[in-house]
Image (cartoon, helix red, strand yellow):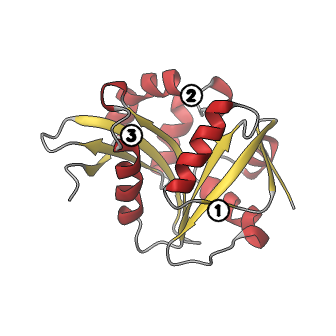
Amino acid sequence: MSIYHIERGGHADMKRIYPMMEFDFHDWERPSHLELQLAMTRGAELLLLKDAHNVECGYAVMLRSKLTGYVLLGWLGVYPHVRGNGIGGQFLTLIREHYEDWQGILLEVTEYPELEKARKLHAFYQRNGYGDVACHYILSGRDTALMYMPIKGAGDISSVARSVVRSVYECMYTENKLWNLITIEK
């Protein structure tokens, strides 16, 4: 049994967490604070990882499409004081349980396979049940691995990756902005 649990955060939590996101993610891979706040009004969720004493240990920003039933784990951070103790894997398990009635969860590993950090993240997500979607995925001009964990949906979404990605990003970006940021090729 995990000593951790997830709570849903609100707009004030996003305002508080955004400076941590600025530390954890490059400018080109992180939306603006305003884009995240607007996305939350359109269905995105901020999940807060808390321990048994209700101390916050991490966050995850999830982009959701109720229409298609898919979720994108957009930005995840485990706080430095608790990193390295298997908490990231526990957080992923809790996220999967939180979305147990959904089709599946996607995530992006940027600058993969170029950077060692990206290769380590990719391996971490593979160990936690995520597999590669068979497509060439480019985010902000950088090679990116699109990964997927099926829950109730198809095991392979390669043939519909473009429409699934569009559906989860709809709460954040217009279609034009999305396709200026992301390229998906077979």
C-alpha separation, residue under disc 2 versus residue under disc 1: 23 Å
C-alpha separation, residue under disc 3 versus residue under disc 2: 13 Å
The disc labelled 2 sits on which kind of residue?
Answer: Phe
Q: Is residue 138 left or right of residue 13?
A: right
In the drawing, what numbered circle is on residue 127?
none
C-alpha separation, residue under disc 1 versus residue under disc 3: 22 Å
x, y (%) of residue 42? Answer: 50, 53
Q: Is residue 103 left or right of residue 87?
A: right
In the drawing, what numbered circle is on residue 25?
2
Q: Residue at x 25, y 35 (%)?
A: 56
Tell me if residue 41 comes above or below residue 67 in the rendering: above
Q: Mark 3 highlights which residue?
A: 59
The disc labelled 3 sits on which kind of residue?
Answer: Tyr
Q: Mark 1 highlights which residue?
A: 167
Q: Nearer the viewer, residue 151 or 19?
A: 151
Q: Residue at x 78, y 72 (%)?
A: 159
Quarter of the image with the N terminus in it: bottom left
Ranked by sequence position, the earlier of labels 2 and 1 is 2
Helix, strand or loop at mark 3: strand
Q: Is residue 122 left or right of residue 100?
A: right
Q: Residues within 10 Å of mark 1 (few under 14, many from 20)?
A: many
Quarter of the image with the C terminus in it: bottom right
x, y (%) of residue 132? Answer: 68, 59
Is residue 73 in view from this perspective?
A: no
Tell me if residue 36 comes above or below residue 131 in the rendering: above
Q: Nearer the viewer, residue 1 or 185?
A: 1
Q: Residue at x 59, y 72 (%)?
A: 68
Helix, strand or loop at mark 2: loop
